[in-house]
Every structure is written in C-alpha cells, then in structure tokens.
Amino acid sequence: MNLKKRLAAVDIDGTLVTDTKELLPQTKTDIQAFIQNGGVFVLATGRPTPGIRRYAEELDLKHLGGYIISYNGARTFDAKTNALLFQKNIPPDCYSRIFDAAEKLNLPLTGYKNDVAVTQKANDRYFQMETTINRLEIQRVPDMRTEFIYETPKFLITGEADFLGDAEGKLRAMLSDLPLAVFRSEPFFLEITAQGCDKGAAMLELAAACGIKQEETMACGDGFNDVTMLCAAGLGVAMANAQAPAKEAAAYITESNLENGVGNALRKFAL
C-alpha cells in the first residue's frame, strides 16, 4: 500500500487514550493497520518511559515494530528491541541555578534517575497522579543538591494551574541565559529540559534516521508540549479536545480522544 504519510507520531494523554486512560479498540485497529501497511508509528509523550509500556504492549509494538519518544523528547527507543537510540539530558552544570530558582519560587522539583522519581518536596495530588499513572518508584531525598550528581532527562514541577501559570514566566526568565527549555506540558505540569529537547526535534531526528522526509510525517496531539511536534510534522493534527495553542499550531483538527480522533486522522491522511 502506498502510504500518504510514512511516519505518525502520536501523544498519549488526551490524544491516544480516553480520559480514563483507556485505548479504544477502533484506535488500536487503525494504528495497527497503519503499521501493517508499512507505516512507522511513534508514541511521543512527556511521560517517563515506564508509563508508556502499557500502551506499547496493547498495540503489540514489540512484534509489529515502532518507536517510543519519552520525557518530552529526551529519550527515543526502538519499541521492538528496547534499544536506546537517542538521548538528551539536562547539562549538570545548570543544576545549581535550577535549584536556586526553584527555592526562590518555592517550586517542588522532581527529577528522574533510571525512571525513578526523585524529589525532596513534591507531594501534591498532581505528583501523586504522575507517579501512579506511570507506575514510578518514588525516592525521597533530604537534599536535591547533593543527590543530583548524575544526569537527568528533565525536571518536573507539579501544582495548580494558576500557580504554575504565574511561576512559568518567572522561572523561564531566571534561567533564560542557560541552554534550557521551560514550558508547561499540561496546566498542572511545568517542565525543564535541555534546550532543543522537545517532541518535534525528536520526531524529526527519528524520521531522518528512518530515511523519512519531513513532509512524509504527521503528528497528533492535544497539549502545550505537542506544539513543537505539530509544527515540525509535515501535517500537524490537533484533537477536538486540545488546548488552544495546539489547535493554533495544527493544520487540521480531528475528533476528540473519546471519538477515535487518532484513528480517523490516520485513515484520512495516511492510509
């Protein structure tokens, strides 16, 4: 079959799965049809890697093939072999400035060590949601400064949307001279990654490695952190339930995550 789009990168929460985190049977069928007809399917998410495995297994990517982009682009894996293909970490010489800014703004930082959530202060309901959904072990440490002598893919700050909305601009300004990106992936998640580390960059890096041109790619997403991917893809598709910036970045708006928006987009633009 001659595919109109050869690579499809799809966000998970609010895009691939329902609000109760379930994969619709028709969505699964449509994705597997795309793969079986020669398409390269990519799960691209801000989630830590352990939080993706359930959906990789449900889609049978270990046998059908595909890729996983986790930590908002900091890790790219081959879903069939579990081989790590690309990684981008926060430069360790930025840590002290990050910790200084977090202390000044009273932000509860969480970092990651081998897919373990490491924190000193985080314990709000969004932190609990993050660790529960992604099945993460939690390591509580007395001092983040002395703990983080290793590289981490990102730092996460959790909290109420109004609080993080106010903190986002302040934190970005305080770290503006460093090679870092500061952004919200969800209203209640504020993230710090290495500069140039985002879903869009990771998708294009993977596409190039697969010999796929930018115009042969498509991406589906709903969140703030999907904007780079929607802009970078040959075709950006936002969900009907997407945040306003994602809709503005997309070339097309499909049905919601409750209505097989991903599958409908694949059938319309790829198959």
Image (cartoon, helix red, strand yellow):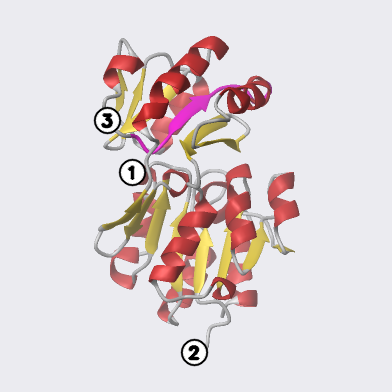
Q: In this view, does 97 lie above or below 185?
A: above
What mark, if any, has residue 1 been given in the picture?
Answer: 2
Q: Which residue is label 3 attached to?
A: 150
Per the image, label 2 sits on a secondary structure element best described as loop
Q: How crowded is mark 1: few (under 14 residues within 10 Å), some or many (20 or more)?
A: some
Can you say which quadrant of the picture contains the C terminus? bottom right
The tag earlier along the polypeptide, 2 or 3, is 2
What mark, if any, has residue 166 been given in the picture?
Answer: none
Residue at x 34%, y 65% (from the top left corner): 60
Q: Do the residues labelled 2 and 1 touch (CB within 8 Å)?
A: no
Q: In this view, does 186 lie to the left or right of 208?
A: right
The tag earlier along the polypeptide, 1 or 3, is 1
State how far apart marks 2 and 3 are (Cα): 46 Å
At which x and y percent is residue 212? 47, 75
Q: Which amino acid does label 2 sit on?
A: Met
Residue 250 picture quarter: bottom right
Badge nearest the viewer, 1 or 3: 3
Q: Which of 115 and 256 is in front in this view?
A: 115
Which residue sits furthest front? 177
Q: Nearer the viewer, residue 203 or 49?
A: 203
Q: In this view, does 238 lie above or below 111?
A: below
Q: What residue type is labelled 3?
A: Tyr
The tag earlier along the polypeptide, 2 or 1, is 2
Q: Which residue is label 1 attached to?
A: 50
Q: What span is colored magenta in the figure?
A: 152-162
Residue at x 52%, y 25% (from the top left corner): 158
